[in-house]
Image (cartoon, helix red, strand yellow):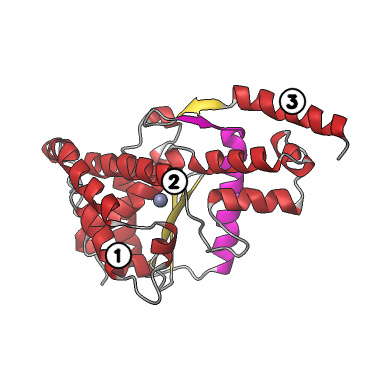
Amino acid sequence: MPKSMKRILTTALLSLAATGCAVSPTGEKTLLLNSSAQMNSIGSQSFEEMKKQKPIEQDAKTNKYVACIANAIVAQVPREYGYQPSQWELVVFKSDDKNAFALPGAKIGVYTGMIKLAKNHHQLASVIGHEVAHVLAQHSNARLSQQQLTQLGLATTSLILGETVDSTTRQAALNAVGLGAQYGILLPYSRRHESEADQLGQELMAKAGFDPREAAALWQEMSKQGGATPPEFLSTHPAPATRIQQLSAQADTYLPVWREAINNGRHPDCDRFKPY
Ligand SMILES: [Zn+2]
């Protein structure tokens, strides 16, 4: 690339970087170079492709169980995030992998393997809350913005400028929403993003009427599953003792939020649909 071109691109990216600074839900400064519309489009397209490639669970009881939990969670998403509860699309994928994810564009995917792992609706709520929190905090956008800054190439710039997207850029975009070269390979977020999603997710689950203490229990259950073939979710969400301790400590903060939810009639009885 000629030097002059590189300088022009650098200037363009830096000016975008200057306008793209935002503050995350927990008050961290974050760089967001892409519009919500762009991220929603990437998330929605990836979800459509996943639905074509992976078997979808048709069992009514299983679907009711997960929908009961997911609906309670998304109903508590503060309106300033720009999502309506009815916008969220939930798909239960038939797979023994212990996995779950959420994508920009209000998409939630839960694998049947994760439903089996979670001992009760509180524990599955902690997973869904955590994944929805990644979407609300725009972690995919932050991750893609980082890639764009480090790549600093024409392909990357074309995505920012909304021009034709080539395969390299498309791959970077897919990586950013957490889907690797093959769909279903979810990439890890940074430790900071994980702890932000833990915090925001635990607050969401408590507001929705789920016991926030069960978040730590879920991760304990997950880490027990380690060994030679750790769950896919664990490979993208390392659960060291410090993280479990943090979730335990935070649960005390959210217990009053949970009690208030119960007092206000938010007491989802999803376990009545529990399929396993
Ligand atoms: Zn996560």
Q: Quadrant of residue 266?
A: top left
Indicate if the residue with disc 1 has its beta carbon within 8 Å of ligand 1: no
Indicate if the residue with disc 3 has its beta carbon within 8 Å of ligand 1: no
Judge whether 64 appears above or below 189 on screen. below
Q: Position of residue 38 (x, y in %)?
A: 62, 38
- For residue 223, the mark is 1
Comes first in the chain, label 1 or label 2: 2
Residue type at mark 2? Answer: Trp
Q: Is residue 221 magenta?
A: no
> Do we see residue 98 in this rendering?
yes
Q: Distance between the Cα atoms at labels 1 and 3?
A: 45 Å
Q: Secondary structure at mark 3?
A: helix
Q: Position of residue 93 (x, y in %)?
A: 45, 66
**In the rendered image, which quarter contains the C terminus?**
bottom left
Comes first in the chain, label 1 or label 3: 3
Q: Which residue is labeled 2 in the image?
A: 88
Residue type at mark 3? Answer: Thr
Q: Which residue is labeled 3 in the image?
A: 11
Residue type at mark 1? Answer: Ser
Residue found 51% across the figure and 44% down from its top:
104
Comes first in the chain, label 2 or label 3: 3
Badge 3 density bin: few <14, some 14–19, many ≥20, Cα 10 Å: few
Judge whether 139 appears above or below 227 on screen. above
Magenta range is 29-53
242 or 128: nearer the viewer: 242
Secondary structure mostly seen in the magenta stretch: helix
**Lateral position of residue 255 relative to residue 14, left or right:** left
Q: Secondary structure at mark 2?
A: loop
Nearer the observer: mark 1 or 2; the answer is 1
**Lateral position of residue 210 relative to residue 35, left or right:** left
